[in-house]
């Protein structure tokens, strides 16, 4: 999953590059900097709102890309995760009104993967066991985080009349930012189809937190999720969000099969 | 050494439990986790782990557009323009482009502006906006900067935000008008 997240980061840079000045430029940014009070943790993750550092956004991007590439090639994976997390959260916070859940999830997962090794056994058995403990706990944190996304989203939807009566997807696809003209015409022409889609989305989000831990069903569930997120990416235009969500699905395969953790943290 | 390893495991498990609990409290709706309890987790969650997963619940109910007329000298005014339209059309044509970011920027500001004024809009349909509100300032900044990036001299601006109910049948329109105000940061 870590390499996929680094891939998302690299894609993000390539995507932003054509409008980098309009988003980050000192004179030309469409987004005002945030006001900060003193040197706090908030300031540390909003460095590009500090007057003296506003113009250094390209440096943040270069460091981010350098460590993302290094991490993808397998060099210093944990250090790379942390550095990419730190640069990414600063770059994201500078353009805070443009963020989606995918951006937030990307940062969270980068942070957690900073504590997960690639699975190489250390020479010292004691350190190896400590490493395994970190790997297990933070892998669980990644899984729990993704489960929380779907579970909480489902809870909010269960409290929303439009999701319960089936009109949510139809209404959403009538919003210009999350649709396009041909789709909007189809939505009005076939309302029952979109009612069905609404209930399917709700069912998927309710089922995910449980079924993703059932080995026999997991691959079908995740495949459905990939299809669902493809729709969100291309029909609704939330491309980055979908890309990150699909990449995060790897956590349900990566660490179980590739790193071959011990069953016991300590012997 | 065994005790040290047990301490590490114990600490990690405790961290897992505490972090997950705080995250859940932070993201649950207010009717499930009262604001008073959420306040206690806020210092831990922000700024590294801040998150929200409402994800289109409630569903946005209006389409929105902003129009601007500006003046370089306070006397001669331009025609009304929709400064962010081109980004929307570009985004609808190619989903992976950076236009998505700019669309989200103006869409988010207009969405929250609607929420701030919803009661008034539903009562009176067309209102004069309050320029002191936070989301107006985000919108004003973005519009002004967009005009200046295109080479316009902007001394004063007027904004008109139009909301159209997203529906296959009824087409209710609302508007917020911001009469002439000074540009500037």
Image (cartoon, helix red, strand yellow):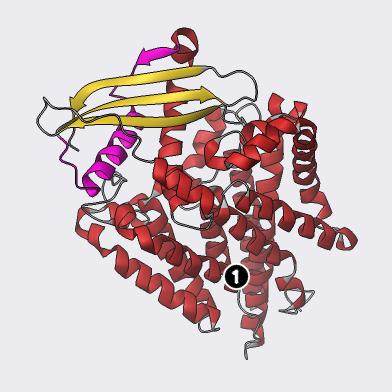
Q: Quadrant of residue A8?
A: bottom right
What residue is drawn where x is 28% and y is 23%?
Answer: B131
Region of the chain picked out in magenta, as a range = B125-154
Q: Which residue position holds label 1?
A: A4
Against A77, residue B58 (above or below) is above
Q: Position of residue A159 (x, y in %)?
A: 70, 28
Q: Position of residue B133 (x, y in %)?
A: 33, 25
Against B101, residue A250 (above or below) is below
Q: Position of residue A111 (x, y in %)?
A: 52, 63
Q: Is residue B54 visible?
A: no
Q: Quadrant of the C terminus of chain A?
A: bottom right
Against A182, residue A229 (above or below) is below
Taking depth in this image into account, of A28 and A219 the one nearest to the observer is A28
What residue is drawn where x is 44% and y is 76%?
Answer: A67
Q: Is residue B84 left or right of residue B157?
A: right
Q: Residue furthest top?
A: B123
Taking depth in this image into account, of A107 and A223 the one nearest to the observer is A223
What residue is drawn where x is 55% and y is 48%?
Answer: A101
B31 magenta-colored: no
Disc 1 sits on a residue from what chain? A
């Amino acid at each position: 999953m870590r390499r996929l997240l680094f891939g998302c980061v690299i894609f993000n840079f390539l995507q932003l590059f054509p409008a980098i000045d309009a988003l980050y430029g000192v004179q030309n940014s469409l987004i005002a900097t945030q006001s900060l009070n003193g040197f706090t943790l908030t300031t540390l993750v909003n460095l590009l709102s500090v007057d003296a550092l506003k113009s250094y956004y390209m440096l943040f991007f270069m460091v981010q890309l350098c460590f993302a590439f290094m991490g993808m090639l397998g060099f210093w994976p944990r250090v790379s995760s942390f550095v990419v997390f730190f640069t990414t959260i600063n770059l994201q916070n500078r353009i805070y009104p443009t963020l989606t859940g995918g951006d937030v999830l990307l940062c969270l997962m980068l942070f957690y993967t900073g504590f997960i090794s690639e699975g190489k056994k250390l020479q010292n058995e004691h350190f190896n066991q400590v490493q395994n403990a970190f790997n297990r706990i933070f892998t669980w944190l990644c899984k729990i985080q993704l489960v929380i996304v779907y579970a909480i989203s489902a809870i909010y939807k269960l409290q929303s009349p439009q999701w319960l009566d089936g009109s949510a997807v139809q209404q959403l696809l009538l919003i210009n930012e999350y649709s396009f003209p041909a789709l909007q015409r189809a939505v009005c022409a076939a309302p029952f189809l979109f009612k069905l889609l609404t209930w399917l989305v709700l069912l998927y989000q309710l089922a995910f937190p449980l079924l993703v831990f059932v080995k026999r069903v997991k691959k079908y569930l995740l495949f459905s999720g990939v299809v669902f997120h493809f729709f969100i990416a291309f029909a609704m235009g939330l491309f980055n969000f979908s890309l990150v969500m699909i990449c995060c699905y790897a956590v349900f395969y990566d660490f179980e099969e590739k790193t071959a953790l011990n069953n016991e943290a300590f012997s | 050494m065994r005790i040290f390893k047990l301490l590490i495991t114990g600490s990690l498990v405790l961290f897992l439990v505490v972090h997950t609990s705080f995250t859940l409290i932070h993201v649950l709706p207010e009717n499930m986790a009262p604001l008073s309890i959420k306040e206690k987790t806020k210092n831990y969650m922000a700024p590294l782990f801040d998150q929200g997963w409402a994800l289109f619940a409630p569903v946005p109910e209006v389409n929105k557009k902003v129009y601007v007329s500006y003046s370089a000298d306070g006397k001669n005014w331009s025609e009304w323009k929709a400064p962010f339209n081109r980004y929307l059309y570009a985004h609808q044509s190619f989903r992976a482009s950076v236009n998505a970011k700019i669309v989200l920027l103006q869409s988010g500001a207009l969405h929250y502006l609607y929420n701030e004024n919803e009661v008034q809009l539903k009562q009176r349909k067309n209102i004069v906006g309050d320029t002191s509100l936070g989301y107006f300032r985000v919108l004003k900044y973005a519009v002004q900067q967009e005009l200046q990036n295109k080479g316009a001299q902007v001394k004063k601006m007027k904004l008109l935000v139009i909301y159209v109910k997203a529906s296959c049948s009824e087409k209710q329109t609302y508007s917020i008008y911001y009469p002439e105000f000074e540009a500037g940061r």
